[in-house]
Amino acid sequence: MSFDGEVAISATGMVKLFGERRVVDGVDLSVPRGAIYGVLGPNGAGKTTTLRMLLGIIEPDGGSRTLLGHSAPRDASDQVGYLPEERGLYPAMKAREAIAFMGALRGLDWKTGRARAVELMEAAGLGHAVDEKIRKLSKGMAQLVQLLGAVVHRPDLLVLDEPFSGLDPVNQERLEALINAERDRGATVLFSTHIMAHAERVCDRLAIIAGGKRRFEGTVDDARATLPQRVRYRPSSPRPGIADVLPADAVADGDEWRFAMPPQGIERLLVTLIDRGDGIAGLSIERPSLHDAFVRIVGGNGDALPEPQA
């Protein structure tokens, strides 16, 4: 790595105005070096604008940011790999040449780029398509080729804008594996998404943005901890008055009851239920998902909350 300190990216009070609308409104971010960091939010939350300001593609109207130790992000451009939300490759190029070409734009020599392109495609399960022209590839394969072009020069920082959009489950898994491999190589990975399942599986830390503001920053577990665990309880011999014993938020669902984990834990309640003779035919404790936490954190601040997806 060619930069100092433990933070790869930092932003303080970043603002972007489009006309009179504050698309990004005072966003703070701190992305640790060597981490996978997700920027989550509904469509239109300001994620893409935030990434573009961090990269120096557009300038903020307020606040400051540093990227790999540079206050002018473009000074670090050769150390960055970027997959924009708008995909684009030359359709007549062969896959290997397309990857090498993208590396050359970041200063990688052509011979090394072509050799690395073959290695990367084989590792991603695309070795059979090395000499295929882009126009003959499926949308998902072409998207992975463009991603490999973003990493062929082995950047210190990889920035991916909605990288999972439009990928089938097989290529989603390949992308997750590549993101993990880049982090294991030592790179910092920053990506935006509105699909919670991917962030839940790969992120070391994440920020949630809605309405142009940062609503949360922390780990996946930190986000989940904003909601209580849920209990599902099925008595073996329910006695009259069981609803009065269970927590006030308990809701019957067939022969089961569902309620939030009591603040004092579940043990005292279970003792009471057993002593009453209600018994326990089934009991499970469910941790909130990141999607549940996202909905809780964003609340009415998201115009279009994302659906949970695998």
Image: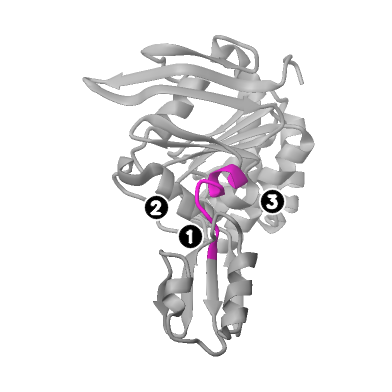
**Picture coordinates of residue 158, whole percent (x, y):** 62, 32
Mark 1–mark 2 Cα distance, whole angstroms, equals: 9 Å
| Residue that carries the numbered disc 3 in the rendered image | 177
**Which residues are the magenta region?**
220-230
Residue 253 can be seen, yes or no? yes
Q: Is residue 148 above or below residue 155?
A: below
Q: Local crowd at mark 2 within 10 Å, few (<14), some, or many (≥20)?
A: some
| Residue that carries the numbered disc 1 in the rendered image | 309
What secondary structure is marked by label 3? Answer: helix
User: Outermost residue, front direction?
Assistant: 275
Residue 5 image-quadrant placement: top right
Asked whether 78 falls inside the magenta stretch, the response is: no
What secondary structure is marked by label 1? Answer: loop
**Picture coordinates of residue 131, whole percent (x, y):** 66, 50
Sooner in the amino-acid sequence: mark 3 or mark 1: 3
Mark 3–mark 1 Cα distance, whole angstroms, equals: 18 Å
Q: Is residue 5 above or below residue 115?
A: above
Q: Residue at 56% of width from left, 62% of height from top?
A: 169
